[in-house]
Amino acid sequence: MSATIILGVIGSDAHAVGITILDQALSTAGFDVVNIGVQSSQQDFISAVEAHEGDAVLVSSLYGHAEQDCRGFHEAIESAGLDPITYIGGNLAVGQDDFEQTKECFRAMGFDRVFDSETKPMEAIAALKADMNIAESEAERTRLTS
């Protein structure tokens, strides 16, 4: 598998632990990962997709301001002539009471999948493989579930 994943934390958020774990899990699962780090702008993500021919963008946000940070993100991606799969996950809204409502908000913004802060890396990996039509070999299934 040689799908390229662009991974980063958007906006002023400096939480790095989650993307470090995701980076390692995605790499172990066979993806090529470009980790653009924390406090990344929308343009940082777009530039990375262009430079590395990214197949998917995984946006992380834990400080609760993802809605503000992601406004116009998909319009900017489209304006650049790009069409990667886009996921977002984390603690996306301050005072989030109903994740389904938050999920609907980000789906309406154009994200293909929306995950909460309790999502395990293997769930995101399984979703990526499904969305990219990547079949897992028996060896991968055994390694990832052991």
Image (cartoon, grey):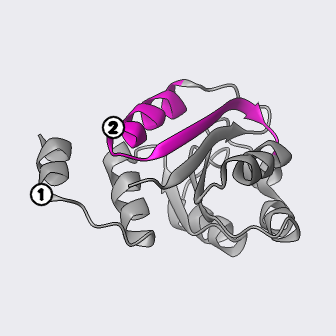
Identified at 74% across, 44% down, the residue is 65
Q: Is residue 90 left or right of residue 75?
A: left
* Mark 1 burial class by Cα count in 10 Å: few <14, some 14-19, many 20+: few
Figure check: 81 above or below 18: below
Q: Is residue 34 inside the magenta stretch?
A: yes
71 or 130, which is in the foreground? 130
User: Which of the image's four quarters has the C terminus?
Assistant: top left
92 or 1, which is in the foreground? 1
Figure check: 141 above or below 106: above
Amino acid bearing label 2: Thr
Identified at 20% across, 45% down, the residue is 144
| Quarter where residue 13 is shown | top right
Residue hosting label 2: 28
Label annotation for residue 15: none
User: Which of the image's four quarters has the N terminus?
Assistant: bottom left
Amino acid bearing label 1: Glu
- Helix, strand or loop at label 1? It is helix
| Quarter where residue 112 is shown | bottom right
- Give the mark, 1 or 2, whose residue is nearer the N terminus: 2
Residue hosting label 1: 138
Q: Let me know if residue 97 appears in the view.
A: yes
- Helix, strand or loop at label 2? It is helix
Range of residues picked out in magenta: 17-41
Identified at 77% across, 66% down, the residue is 74
33 or 73, which is in the foreground? 33
Q: Let me know if residue 120 appears in the view.
A: no
Place of residue 139 in the rendered image (x, y in percent of width and height, measured from the top left) = 13, 50
